Amino acid sequence: MKIMNMSSTSAVALCLGFILMSFTGHCYGQLQVGFYREKCLVDVEAIVTQVVVAKFNEDPTIAPALIRMQFHDCFVKGCDASILLDGNKTEKTAPPNLSVRGFEVIDAAKAAVEVVCPEVVSCADIISMATRDVFDLGEQNPSPSLHLCRGKNSWGQNGLGQAKMGKKFLPTPRRGQKQLSNAS
């Protein structure tokens, strides 16, 4: 039997892809694409897409960065956008998250959405929409079948201030394949 060789980077990317795909279909909020259609007078998803597309055209490496942000936000106690919180002892400043990037994209999308639909769309939903959009941008044909959950805390409890949890359970990006395989 022939064994395929796979670089550790490819293996990690493949694992992250499977993890993110496992998020689809496990919505506890029963929310869907177009969730804000009746809550806002404009298509807020289109606004987020415009911001993401503009950044992607400027820097295509934003696609994996935003996917990674979604993963790091959701890993500790659910998808609640707590990774966006500034300050000491937050998820954003936890060692495994120091290399997460793309915050400026989420900030720009949130600012654009707030202009037309203030205090309605959660930051967690904007991260989810942006992640969906970069998956679509990564393909030649958009994938309407990828439905990420939307709604505050749709995948778990409020995870605000979970820096200690992130530090304890999230492996750093510098870990090797052997270390990642032994992580629990």
Image (tube, rainbow, N blue to C red):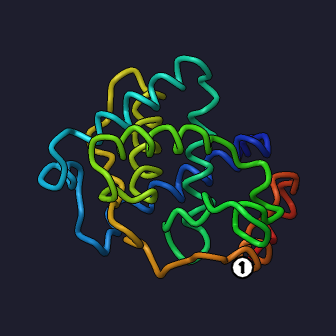
**Residue nearest the observer in this picture, 154 or 41:** 41
Instruction: Pick the residue in front: 15 or 130.
Output: 130
Which quadrant of the view contains residue 91?
A: bottom right
**Which residue is drawn at the image coordinates 33% and 24% (left, top)?**
141
The spot of residue 128 in percent (x, y) is 42, 52
Q: Amino acid at mark 1?
A: Met
Residue 109 is situated, as x and y percent measured from the top left of the image, at 44, 40
175 above or below 44?
below
**Extreme-top residue of the structure:** 57
Q: Residue at x 44, y 42 (%)?
A: 111
Give the left or right position of residue 24, taking residue 91 as reference: left
Query: Residue 97: where, in percent of width, then height?
Result: 75, 58
Q: Is residue 19 above or below residue 33?
A: below
Q: Does residue 108 sit above or below 139 in this rendering?
A: below
Which of the 4 quarters of the picture holds residue 19? bottom right
Residue drawn at point x = 43 percent, y = 26 percent: 139
Mark 1: secondary structure: helix
Where is residue 105? Give x, y as percent: 55, 38
Residue for badge 1: 165
